[in-house]
Amino acid sequence: MRFQPMRSRTILLPVPLPDFLTAPLEAEYVCVSSPSEDVGGMVVPGGYRVEQDLLARLPKLEIISVFGVGYDGVPLAACRARGIRVTNTPDVLTDDVADIATALVLMTSRRLVEADRHVRAGEWSQQAFPLAHSLRGKIAGILGLGRIGKAVAKRLEAHGMGLVYHSRTRQEVPWRWCSSVIELAEASDFLIITCPGGPSTRHLVSAEVLSALGQGGTLINVSRGSVVDEQALVHALDRGIIRSAGLDVFEHEPQVPEALRAHPHTVLLPHVGSATHETRRAMAALVVGNLRAHFASQPLLSPVEE
Ligand code: NAP
Ligand code: 8YV
């Protein structure tokens, strides 16, 4: 077989990615932003929807390297059928995402965004800020006890909270397993979503689940917006069915419903779970490493196995 120098490989980057990722890719490969027959690899952000018709225009595609842990936008069955390998960036982002979930728990329970606005508006001298809610003794329900879910659980235990969880599989952990999302919500003061997105978890958090979470309840979502029925969430907040919500992800990003933006008891972040210099660079290194390993016929560093 004739030796093929690396730079002859073509990598498709269908959306802009950070320089610290594109620079090493451009040094090793021909990088393009539109589909072409030559494309052998593709790099996409977490959650990016890889449509079937895009795949059809890439007859030589061998690998999709996801710059993120969530590969819910990749049609795995179609990739498997064509022998296209899929990789992602697990583990390196777990702590940062768990920190953001914990921050959202603290920001909603202690009303920190409202408190900040109160001081900035010069209202402190006229009226005391209303009391907030303590975490100690409250129950956090983790929906999806995987890498991020466990890291969140450990952090919240350190805040004196009790833990319950729901995943499809019961695990050997010190926390009570709930057999359904409804049972989890009923048991929780804070329902924290850390399961994957995609069709199998779409609207898992429904109007019924929000009712089960109840009046004193708070919804925290750091997974995917698709897991929550966002209209039902708006309704639940407006009617006082739940108390508050801390959201890093939304159903139709970057659109955030006006009703969520206007609500006094929501804390809203622009999908920044993994957005630190350190973590995004570690994710980029995994993306590059996976492509390098694939084209050198070495074992992949972090293949998606499902
Ligand atoms: P993980 O280790 O695979 O954990 C996912 C957990 O969800 C597993 O324990 C799985 O357990 C559970 N699960 C899957 N389907 C479920 C269902 N239908 N009902 C209940 N539980 C279910 O993944 P991770 O690394 O923790 O990442 C989790 C997700 O976080 C990613 O997929 C991504 O969408 C999101 N994320 C967001 C950000 C951000 O910036 N906000 C950053 C990184 C990741 P069972 O299989 O036993 O059900
Ligand atoms: C990023 C994510 O926002 O890992 C994921 O699944 O959602 C986040 O880490 C994204 O992947 C950055 O491209």
Image (cartoon, rainbow, N blue to C red):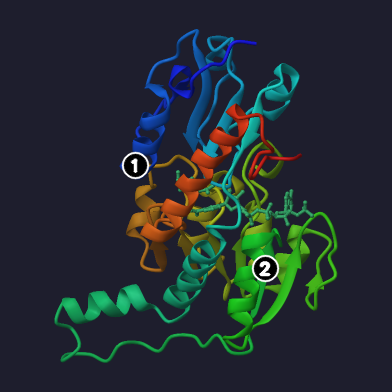
**Residue nearer the viewer, 272 or 265:** 272
**Residue 66 rendering spot, x and y as whole percentages:** 54, 38
Label 2 SS: helix
Label ID, residue 150: 2
**Residue nearer the viewer, 292 or 245:** 292
| Label 2, ligand 1: CB separation under 8 Å | yes
Residue under numbered circle 1: 18
| Image position of 146 with respect to 4: above or below | below
**Residue 109 rendering spot, x and y as whole percentages:** 47, 79
Residue drawn where x is 47% and y is 53% of the image: 282
Label 1 SS: loop
Q: Are marks 1 and 2 in contact (CB under 8 Å)?
A: no
> Mark 1, residues whose alpha carbon is within 10 Å: few (<14), some, or many (≥20)?
few
**Residue nearer the viewer, 55 or 216:** 55
> Mark 2, residues whose alpha carbon is within 10 Å: few (<14), some, or many (≥20)?
some
| Label 1, ligand 2: CB separation under 8 Å | no
| Image position of 61 with respect to 265: above or below | above
Say which amino acid is labelled 2: Lys
Residue drawn where x is 58% and y is 38% of the image: 290
**Residue 126 rendering spot, x and y as whole percentages:** 17, 90
Quarter occupied by the N terminus: top right
User: In this rendering, would 127 be left or right of 31?
Assistant: left
Q: Earlier in the sequence, mark 1 or mark 2?
A: 1
